[in-house]
Image (spheres, grey):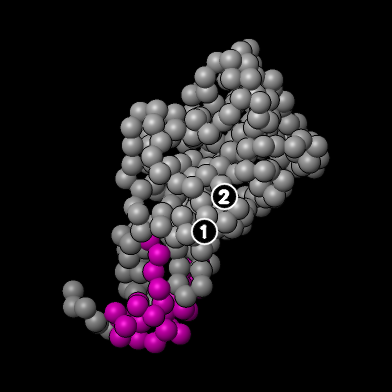
Amino acid sequence: MPASFTLSLPDERQQIILDRLMQRGRVLAGDLAREFGTSEDTIRRDLREMASAGKCRRVYGGALPLSPAAGPLAARRAEAPERKAALGRVAATLVQPGQVVFFDAGSTNSAIVRALPAGLGVTIATNAPDIAADLVGKSGVELILIGGRVDPRSGAALGARALRDAREIRVDLAFLGACAVDAEAGVAAFDAEEAEFKRLVAERAKAVAAAVTTDKLGTAAPFLVAPVSRLTHLVVEADAPESALAPLRRAGVSVYRAERLGEATQ
């Protein structure tokens, strides 16, 4: 296909734009306009239509692909368990004795909890019953379960009671379950109520951490949780592209790669 070409049918252009999103991640309206030999207004209209159809997320100057993390927790727990276990071993080293630590619901956060050593001497709060179940009886852990209605998709207690409980806990380190992470679009979630809870936790915690698989980097979701500048730590996989990590580092995020078992490298 030539470097510059003209497509008269919006469906043709939008399918190629979708292909570009899958291949490259972020796309820019100006670059696409030059590639297709059309105006930026035409491309912006294409991107608006694609976003309305749930195929991408509009950001300033272009678009991002939607995060793949939209499925129910039961399905996500079965995906890539070895990769999440590797992330969990690295993320668990961020937890220090004497801290009050919050764990949000999520399959990767479950892997972090399972990697915590016994006898650590920490207080752990969580709004996820499955994470709480993994911690019951674990030596060196004082467990606090945040209550409320449990959302069957996310596996998290949400709503007014959960928000009230979270406000009463002073958290040293919060592990957020991040559906999508992008340097410009921030940390985002697919559900408004879930995003509200995560936002409260992120605002009140002394430090905020997230561990994400590579497919969540450079993607978007509909509801903003926090700008990436609010992240203190981000644990990523060995194959995470430096092009996605460099702007996160510039925003002040400490990035750790799960390259070797039980070891984090910055």
Q: Is residue 30 above or below residue 92?
A: below
Between discs 1 and 2, the one toward the N terminus: 2
Under mark 2, the amino acid is Leu
Q: Residue at x 54, y 26 (%)?
A: 113
In magenta, the rendered stretch is: 25-51
Q: Residue at x 58, y 38 (%)?
A: 175
| Pointer 2 residue | 231
Report the Cα–Cα distance between label 1 and label 2.
Answer: 9 Å
Where does residue 161 sit, x and y in percent of width and height?
A: 80, 38
Where does residue 219 sit, x and y in percent of width and height?
A: 46, 56
Q: Which quarter of the picture shows residue 38?
A: bottom left
Q: Which of the two residues, 16 or 88, is positioned nearer the viewer here?
A: 88
Q: Which quarter of the picture shows residue 247?
A: bottom left
| Pointer 1 residue | 251
- In which quadrant of the rendered image does the N terminus lie? bottom left
Q: Is residue 234 above or below residue 54?
A: above
Under mark 1, the amino acid is Ala
Within the magenta stretch, is there residue 10?
no
Where does residue 214 sit, x and y in percent of width and height?
A: 39, 46
Residue 147 falls left or right of residue 265: right
Where does residue 14 sit, x and y in percent of width and height?
A: 37, 71
Q: Residue at x 63, y 37 (%)?
A: 173
Q: Mainly helix, strand or loop, the magenta region? A: helix
Do the CB atoms of the residues marked 1 and 2 lie less than 8 Å apart? yes
For the question of whether residue 222 can be seen, the reply is: yes
